[in-house]
Image (tube, rainbow, N blue to C red):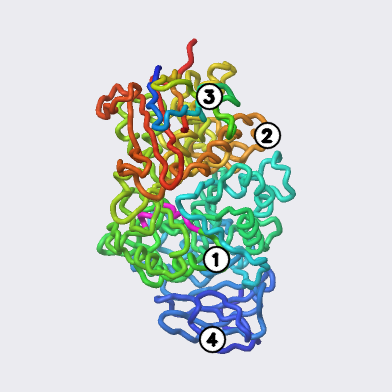
Amino acid sequence: MKVKIPPRTDGGSWLRIVDTALSAGDDFSEPGEEAPLEGEGATYLAAPQSVVVLVG
Amino acid sequence: MPILEHRTTLRTSPGRSYPCGATITPEGVNFALFSEHAQEVFLLLFDLPDAPPTDIIRLEQKNRYIWHILIHDVGAGQLYGYKVRGPYDPSQGHRFNDTKLLICPYARAVTGKIRNSDRLLNSFHASVSGDADLLSDRRDNTLLVPKGIVVDNAFDWQGDCPPEISFEQLVIYEAHLKGFTAHPSSAVAHPGSYLGFMEKIPYLKSLGINAVEFLPLHEFYVEDFLVANGLTNYWGYNTALFFAPESSYAAVPGNQVQEFKSLVRELHKAGIEVILDVVYNHTGEGNELGPTFSLKGIDNRSYYCLTGPPEEPYRYYHNYSGCGNSLRIANPHVLRLVMDSLRYWVEEMHVDGFRFDLASVLGRGDAGDFQRNSAFFHAVAQDPVLCRVKLIAEPWDTDTYQVGNFPVEWAEWNDRFRDTVRRFMRGEKGQIADLGWRLTGSADLFSHGGRSAFHSVNFVTCHDGFTLYDLVSYKRRHNRANREKNNDGAWENYSANCGVEGESDDFRVKLMRRRMVKNFLCILFFSTGTPLLSAGDEVLRSQQGNNNAYCQDNELSWFNWEDLERSNDILAFCRKAIALTRQYRVLHRNKFFDGCVTPDGLCDIVWYDHNLKHPLWDNPKKRILCFRLTGEGGGAPVPVRFSSSSTPRVGR
């Protein structure tokens, strides 16, 4: 399912910390190695039965 | 056994009625025992646990129903017990029987497990059918009953300080002291003991938890029916003595007090608090057909809530606990026993908090009704020692459900969190409105009466019920090992098996189960409130579908340390999840969210659906929930999305 992401107030990118649908190792980022999500008003493709955590 | 009469060569003095129990003084040991209805009280001293008494001393002093004496020239390590003389008249609530040795309710250690061999603990004559409890059994059991040990409080605490972790910082790990290291894979020097657990502190530290909540560590009684079935009481929710650490968990028999203190000291050094699961709602003495080893023989009518028809008004026991009897905490002397016990565990044993089993029983008055202003709650609230420690209620009993209703000092186990999170995650419709409350500290239940967001103790699983792995692997309970034809244990678990009941080699099933476990860990740790993790869930511990393993003291229940390797992905995930909660204060708030704008110009919480629209809370078809949190005091905004769109199942 496509999930819309709210824009960050400072215009920066959200960082993905958790996506439980990803395989072990990628499912929870190491501190400092979070993957940035590109673009404002982006969408995130979330798998069924999953939890996603973003930080900004 | 010789006739019960005074015979001693020891020097005695009147002593004092305070404190209760056996207390070492410069002159000897002071013994004090409460019994309002006893006619005579005898103190028996022993050199050996299984030998006849060396001395039998009739207590002559009684002050405010407390019988007392000072024995000179005895000290730490002295073994003792009581025999109490009075009427055997069950209809009036009196079950005195001076052939039965009784353990001091304040005994700080005992010489071994209490066993009902040949039914010698029964104060009634078992062979009489029908009115079985009305005739007394006159067989002496002095040799059988464990002896109390006079304990010296001295211990090398090495400057121990309680970690004093603020409640909102707490991450609780619920563990069984024996089960954590009983498995051979634990590779500790003293498996299943206080010292064995001590060896595993580095693991707890690396996991990131900062409080261990131990299943009961008070000396407990194994019910006769379990022994008869070749089973045992593994969990230990059947307390015999409120001051004695469980004797069978000692690496060196008799050394349980020193070993327990060592464990607390070392956990504190690692920054980990100790919370005891305590059972003050009933005792192991059961109902009118249960054993007698302490309170029942000392003063049954004072210690227990009794009932009966008009012609025998005190023959039977109120059973609010579902375990045969209920402690009569509305009696001030019984209340004192409980309060003295709690203070002892804090002041002498250095524990940091308590989780009260079936705590609603403790709020019942003499009429049986639950009262937020009960004597017990007032006593706790004003206590200068207990105000320092964490108090957690299991806020229900067999027929009163009080979640959210405890006084301001109390945190509560939140079963609404458990059930709603399970139902949402397995894809049930109509859950998101309730889920919204559960994710944010259950303000609907706890925000009144001065309480804070951490007062909700959130859990998905605990010792009672499925393990987390079994929650995503079994639709139904599988309890045949309990020898009750699978009739015991909770029927409704809100579980889902991901397509296959039980073990599966299908990698897609395995993958889905791992994802579901990770989902639950996220919800547990990232929700507002105090998270409680059940030991082993971080490494996919399974009980093969048994959701009521209270009697399984074996590999079905024990922590298998080989799981660390097998489930290292989940373990790593769990560690990171806990670490993230340390990084962002917004994930362990003490205030409830109120939707107000923070100094950053953002609301503390904003809810969305998948389209950035306001969620349609009441639309039962909605099974996705998104929200954005903005940190209080410097934490960065953390949007968290939880989604669940169908019953977890893999394509086949």
Kindly identify the amino acid type of the residue bearing the numbered disc 1: Arg
Name which residue lies at 47% across and 33% down.
A55
Please determine if labels 3 and 1 lie on a single subunit. Answer: yes
Residue positioned most to the top: B652
Mark 2 residue element: loop
- Label 4 and label 1: CA atoms lie apart by 32 Å
Which residue is tagged 2?
B562
Q: Is residue B593 left or right of residue B118?
A: left
Q: Nearer the viewer, mark 3 or mark 1?
A: 3
Q: Residue B357 in magenta?
A: yes
Q: Label for residue B139?
A: 1
- Residue B113 counted in the magenta span: no
Contact, CB < 8 Å: mark 4 with mark 1? no
Q: Which mark is residue B15?
A: 4
Mark sitting earlier along the chain (4/1): 4
Circle 1 crowding by C-alpha within 10 Å: few under 14, some 14–19, many from 20: some
The percent position of residue B242, horizontal first and vertical second, equals: 51, 63
Point out the stretch of residues depicted in magenta. B353-361
Subunit of label 3: B
Q: x, y (%) of residue B50? A: 67, 66
Residue B489 image position (x, y, % from top left): 44, 38
Kind of residue at badge 2: Glu
Mark with earlier residue (2, 3): 3
For residue A53, side relative to residue B23 (left or right): left
Of mark 1 and mark 2, the one earlier in the sequence is 1
